[in-house]
Amino acid sequence: MAGMADDTTAVVWDSALLDYDMGDHPLNPVRVELTMALARDLGILDRPGVQMITPGEASEIDLTRVHRADYLEAVRLAPIDPFFRGWGLNTPDNPVFDDMHQASARICGATLAAAGAVWHGVARRAVNVAGGLHHAMPARAAGFCVYNDPAVAIAWLLEQGAQRVAYIDVDVHHGDGVQTVFYDDPRVLTISLHESPLALFPGTGFADEIGGPGAEGTAVNVPLPPGTGDAGWLRAFHAVVPSVVRAFAPEIIISQCGADAHRLDPLADLRLSVDGQRAAYIAMRALADEVCDGRWVATGGGGYALVEVVPRAWAHLLAVATGEPLAPETRIPQRWRTLAAARRPEATIPEAMTDGTEPPIESWPGTSEDPVDRAVLATRTAVFPLHGLDPHDPRD
Ligand SMILES: [Zn+2]
């Protein structure tokens, strides 16, 4: 069976993942339901080599590699106490919901299943679109996130003996929870591209957050000005991410693919198109192919344009992970449009997998007065020397 994993991508899915439901709240599971429906209707899940995996809940042992046991206990108790306070819960951002512990543990179980499939060589790549809850802290819910599934999966990989894990976070918000958990651990490289913390939650992710003592250079932050579009975002990505990842030489790449950097997202102010997001996914897969034999685990993340953006972005992600990228001009099947209209009658239902823009390919440095290029230079100056790279050399 040599080479089997080469052709195999695990897609982790169970409709029970939709139980992570905060009610009348921006993080609505309909986006995940519509993503999987779109991928199915486009034939992506029927491609050769796609292996569907049904996840279980992460165990107490798995969760406590990242989270405090007393926090898990609080999450279990919160839904049965209407006056529950503390631990970041029962707030507008993080409302308490029925079976919150089980639903959150299942999201972690799904990302663990994805990481396990790739680490054990069962699949070359794996995707959990329901995952990416990157703001959760060891003892606190934050930013709609109760348990931190990327961190739980990375901690498991370290437990298996992984020595170098790279985490790339393209959500519009800083990947603060994952960065915090591994800030002092030189075995985990966290890279986050996000809208400037001066403008957006969670208010961290400055270029000078570079990792703790003994781990300097293993936290990398690229805060981008509000309004940054495809060209600037992709220029920043290519000016920072490939060089640092190549220098770090990870054994596996975990990507958090929040779709909220899109121009239509109601919670943030970057201006990507789905075409730019597709280009980012292609770049991350190519990087995994180049540096770690293709081992790539991708999760979802944020994304609040529930019909207009998220399903298209993550259907592109699933296509990139399972084989050939979808042609941007691919039409969206009527069957999916009918379902989307039934779920969200007020939404504008997209007709094609493109926003009609071809992302330009620009190399860094651009014009030195461009605020994106100033941001890129700040990041490169902060971390490149720690990886033996020259911040000013465009070849690095
Ligand atoms: Zn986000």
Image: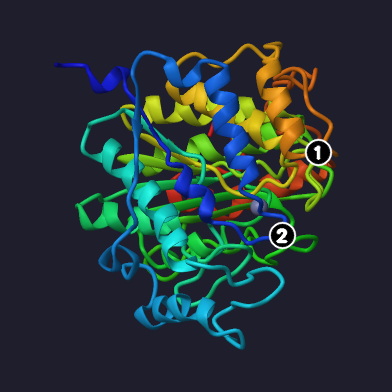
Residue at 31% in and 67% down: 65
Q: Which secondary structure lies at badge 1?
A: loop
- 44 vs 266, left or right, is left
Closer to us: 229 or 243: 229
Q: Position of residue 165 (x, y in %)?
A: 35, 48
Rendered image: mark on residue 25: 2
- 121 vs 20, left or right, is left
Residue extending furthest toward the front: 342
- CA neighbours of label 2 inside 10 A, class few (<14), some (14 to 19), many (20+): some
In the picture shown, does residue 217 fall above or below 275? below
Residue at 54% in and 81% down: 87
In the picture shown, does residue 255 fall above or below 40? below
Rendered image: mark on residue 263: 1
Query: For the residue marked with disc 1, what is the amino acid?
Result: Arg
Residue 249 seen: no
Question: Which quadrant would residue 12 be assigned to in this image?
Answer: top left
Q: Which secondary structure lies at badge 2?
A: loop
Look at discs 1 and 2 and give the one toward the viewer: 2
Q: Position of residue 182 (x, y in %)?
A: 41, 63
Residue at 62% in and 26% down: 278
In the picture shown, does residue 225 fall above or below 233? below
